[in-house]
Amino acid sequence: MRAFLEVFWPYIYRYRWLLVLGYVTSMVSAGISLSVGLIINARLDDVLADPERLEALTGFLLIIVAIIAVQAVAGFCHSYTMSWVGAHIVRNVRRDVFARVLGHGEQLVDEESSGELQTRIIADTVALGDFLGGQLPGLFVTAIMLVGGIAAAIYVSPLLTAAVVTGLVVLATPMLLVLPVLRRRGERTQQAEADTGRGAGEALRNAPVVHAFNQLGRERAGFDAASGRVTRFYLSMLRMQMAFNTLVNAGAWTVLAVVLWIGAREITGGAVTFGQLTAFGYYVVFVLNSGFALVSLVTSVNMAVGRTEKIRGFLSMPAPARMDGRVPLKLPARIELQKLHYRYPSREEDALAGIDLVIEPNTRIAFVGGSGSGKSTLFKVLLRLVEPTTGRLLANGVEAHRYAVAAWREQFGFVPQTEYLVSGTVADNIAYGVRDASKEAIEEAAREAHAHDFVAALPKGYDTDLGEVGNRLSGGQKQRISLARAILTRPAVYLLDEATSALDAESERAVEQALETLAQSSTVLTIAHRLRTVHRADRIVVMADGRVVSQGTHGELDRTEPVYRRLISAYRQ
């Protein structure tokens, strides 16, 4: 609980005055509830002794009803205030968790799937909201009512109170012993839910592959098995809770029966009046319900704390060091990589191993190499999506981490190997990096990317909604939209990860001509798998096993570099 509060206290403290209001109204509600029994104890015997008993009893009941109405209003204010605070805390936590996960995206997605991360961000924060908006306030209120109920019961009859408290201790002790078990089962349920979200997300993202290989049955079975694990863990936890609930309920009625028997004997002996017994009966139910609710809430709190463990882990992650830079990036920039290494967190070998490279402004460089040679990882380092494990990345002789990351990335236009489009219109996708872009600028970028003609032919042109991840476009069309998005930012450096791989020959020639124009005023770095792209480069960098094997022009490397000749031979075929 201490670790929980250390992480979430800043979120709770922000709404401290509303929380004070909620707790004040809860104490008012609890105080009014407790006062009902005291009124019964003080007035019922007098009312029953009144000669005009019916009229006196009616007035007495009206007073009780009025008090209960005030209690209901106070209870509503308390419940709504605490729920409102809980909902807003969850919103703030969810926002910060999303930002932290996104900031560490490469590392986290390498360790955990995006589907599992989605489930953590959404489902686990819902559990946090239930805890902060319901369970934690309920714990406080129930504790007040339990202590107040016992104190009032002692005031009415110490003997009967001793019997009730003894019964409560006997009933509560077994449940408190199983709290660690319930917490572990809550964590297992949480993990099973995350696994289910991960599997569903992967299947939906790869739906064409699932259908193409006739694996619908396999994916359904996998999802059903994961859902079954969630159900089993949940029901296991529920069985334990219900077993103790049943035990406590049975014990509570037993305690009530014993107390009534003792009370009847006390009335017979004249030690207790009917009004006192009625008031005490009210407090017995009050105390038993509060005690049972308190134990149940303590159990729920333990499970909630367990379920939010992963969220606490995300919020405890340090902010990426690369976000700390403040130096503005001056152009044109000479970029250097010095003995640079990078290793993915979940792997044992370096993806980049000792890269030494200089990128001069306004040059066109092609990176070639087999699959897994480190080309795409090198682009991630240049974009500062990941930080080098060791070695240095510099621009104009200054360490990259000293530059403001937003200013750094503004100088790069990135076209990924896998087309990345967002839900929305064509214009939304092209203007993704320049939100205030004019319609004319968007169309100009589309023309340069050889995308304007097919966009204009869409039902609503640039206002056509593309659906989720642009699934209404072909692969080549998506690639041209991605290229137009990069062109619109007018960056100093273009990073093209096979930017023409999905284009037809005519479109490829048009895009190549556009890149020739761009290269006159920008640096163009291309991961190339086509001979045409290689030939047009000012310099070619050959990579293998995360290293730069050699550099030079096409003619130089074709004569002297066997790795390059082998790659070019494959390109020609």
Image (cartoon, rainbow, N blue to C red):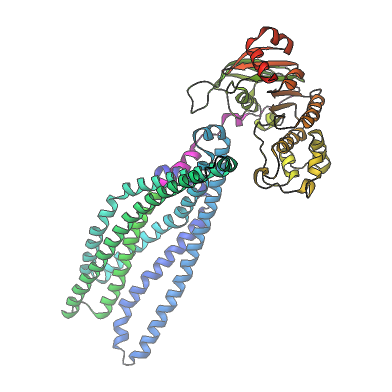
Judge from the rendering whether residue 308 lies leftward or rightward of residue 418; answer left or right: left
Name the spot of residue 229 as percent of width and height, x first: 40, 47
Instruction: Please say if 547 is above or below 229.
Output: above
Q: Reply yes or no: does residue 399 show up in magenta.
A: no
- Is residue 518 toward the left or the right of residue 558 in the image? right
Quarter of the figure with residue 49:
bottom left
Q: Position of residue 463 (x, y in %)?
A: 77, 48
Q: Is residue 209 left or right of residue 2?
A: right
Tell me residue 336's x, y (percent).
Answer: 66, 17
Residue 329 is covered by the magenta coloring: yes
Farthest-out residue, bottom: 51
* Magenta stretch in the rendered image: 305-332
Residue 353 on image: x %, y %: 56, 17
Write the residue at 61% across / 20% down.
370
Residue at x-position 81% and y-position 22%: 520
Vertical placement of residue 397 versus 410, above or below: above
Please indicate whether residue 364 sits to the left or right of residue 209 in the image: right
Closer to us: 78 or 573: 573
Would you place residue 179 above or below residue 373 in this image?
A: below
Pick whichever, 182 or 92, lies toward us: 182
Front residue (pair 451, 148): 451
Q: Nearer the viewer, residue 145 or 400?
A: 400
Residue 537: quadrant of the picture: top right
